[in-house]
Image: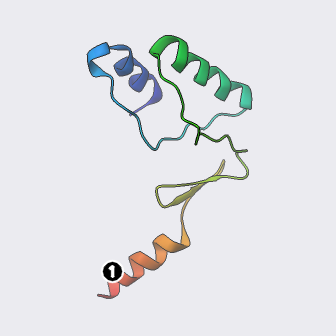
Amino acid sequence: MGFSKMIELLQKKDERKIIDDSIVIVKIKQEAKEIEKFLKENLELELNKKTQIFKNKQGVNFCGYKINEYRLKIRDKGKRKLKKKVKN
């Protein structure tokens, strides 16, 4: 689901749900701050204390993948699990 569709659904009071484990990739830190402000002011949503902002080049580990500005790569732990499942 695209970000604009997600925002559209969240604006409907009866459609609000807790969004857990998600990432937003932006080019500059200011954009992340603007998204945070929008969520708080317009949707009455707040990010929790575990929320972190990383540089694109650094990348993030998310749902078994390493995501950075150029690629989505399966993490080594995920590769090992997959190989083990295939062997059995």
The residue at 65%/51% (across/down) is: 70
Which SS class for mark 1?
Answer: helix
Numbered circles on residues, count: 1
Q: The disc labelled 1 sits on which kind of residue?
A: Lys
Left or right of 59: which side holds 6? left
Left or right of 53: which side holds 83? left
Left or right of 30: which side holds 2? left
| Percent coordinates x, y for residue 74 in the rendering | 51, 65
Q: Is residue 53 above or below residue 40?
A: below
The residue at 48%/61% (across/down) is: 64
| Percent coordinates x, y for residue 9 in the rendering | 34, 20
| Percent coordinates x, y for residue 44 in the rendering | 47, 16
Instruction: Say few, some or many: other residues with alpha carbon within 10 Å of mark 1 (under 14 / 14 to 19 / 20 or more).
Output: few
The residue at 47%/79% (across/down) is: 80
Q: According to the image, label 1 marks what residue? A: 85
Q: Quadrant of residue 20?
A: top left
Q: Is residue 43 above or below residue 20?
A: above
Residue extending furthest left?
14
The residue at 70%/34% (across/down) is: 27
